[in-house]
Amino acid sequence: MSAQNGMQHGSPNGSPNGSLNGTPAIDVHNLNKHFGDKHVVNDVTLQVAHGEIFGFLGPNGSGKTTSIRLMCGLLTPDSGSGTCLGYDIVRESAQIKRNVGYMTQRFSFWEDMTIRENLDFVARIYQMRERKEKVDRALENLGLKTRADQLTGALSGGWKQRLALAACMLHEPKLLLLDEPTAGVDPTARRDFWEELHRLAAQGISVLVSTHYMDEAERCHKLAYIAYGKLLAQGTAQQVIDSQDLATWSIHGERLTELSEQLRKTPGVDQTVVFGSALHVSGHDHAALEKAIRQTTSGMPVRIEPIETGLEDVFIYMMSRSADNYGKAA
């Protein structure tokens, strides 16, 4: 049975909202994990408040999934400490598992069973009381009622995603750990999914979600960016943007790819990225950046203007730098 499919009902110390004396839903410090000679999680420290949607971002192989599993007691850290819903992540991992909903990247339900049968089976496995009522409520809350008798194998990615979330919510957890839950799902289904997450957060449920999508990152209350095991930045979207102190200019015109290559080799320019019909050029030395852009584009049929540095500009910048650091460390 996958961890995706929910855990038993309960809340720490009998608290109705899963909090413990006002402590964060997740509070971990200096977590480390090695697999062989790979340092997969390197001194990770973060806190997730109750009712907060916390986005966990980073390239493939950055340690996101391993970090999530450490935080909910599915893996034991080599070193470090912390609590999840007030429980110690090392000594009380069994209690954490009973109070957390964990949705993995891989869909792992029975495709020859209906949506209702899948949810009922999950409820039976975990010996939930009032099983039928809990299944009915999950179907209603996630908009699955009209499809309850449809075979799971015939569902689109978006509907399978809703089923996975419904299974996570069966035991009424106060913390959801969602590992790239919208990968491969169409934009409309992704939007609906995020609206549901915000509805749950408004009820006091905490959400830690990993994602590659910048529009999803901007929907989170707070963010953390991890690359090759290390947290590079965390805070609100604006705090993450401000932490890199990048100035950005937008250039509109023709032959932007050639211009991008030329600017990339110019002192004062740290990054160039083509965004559709515009070229974003960023740098730390704001004066040197403007000088480089004005000199390089002088006499060219282009329009240049300073713009606010966006979250995607910042994440592309951090990803490129972290990849370089990883390569040097290897």
Image: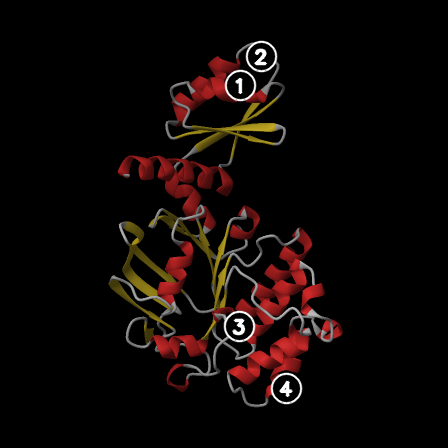
In front of the other: label 2 or label 3?
3
Residue 303 horizontal/vertical position (percent):
60, 21
Report the colour scheme: secondary structure
In front of the other: label 1 or label 3?
3
Amino acid of disc 4 = Glu
Which residue bears the numbered disc 1?
Answer: 259
Which residue bears the numbered disc 4?
Answer: 133
Q: Quadrant of residue 124?
A: bottom right
Amino acid of disc 1 = Leu
**Which numbered marker is on residue 5?**
3
Element at badge 3? helix
Circles 3 and 4, Cβ within 8 Å, touching? The answer is no
**Which numbered marker is on residue 300?**
2
Measure how far apart labels 2 and 3 are at the Cα level.
58 Å
Crowding at mark 2 (Cα within 10 Å: few <14, some 14-19, many 20+): few
In front of the other: label 4 or label 1?
4
Residue 141 horizontal/vertical position (percent):
65, 74
Earlier-in-chain disc, 4 versus 1: 4
Earlier-in-chain disc, 2 versus 3: 3
User: Front-most of 182 and 327?
Assistant: 327
**Which numbered marker is on residue 122?**
none
Measure how far apart labels 2 and 1 are at the Cα level.
10 Å
| Outermost residue, right side | 146
| Outermost residue, left side | 79
Position of residue 62 in the picture relative to residue 116 (left or right): left
Measure how far apart labels 1 and 3 are at the Cα level.
50 Å
Element at badge 2? loop
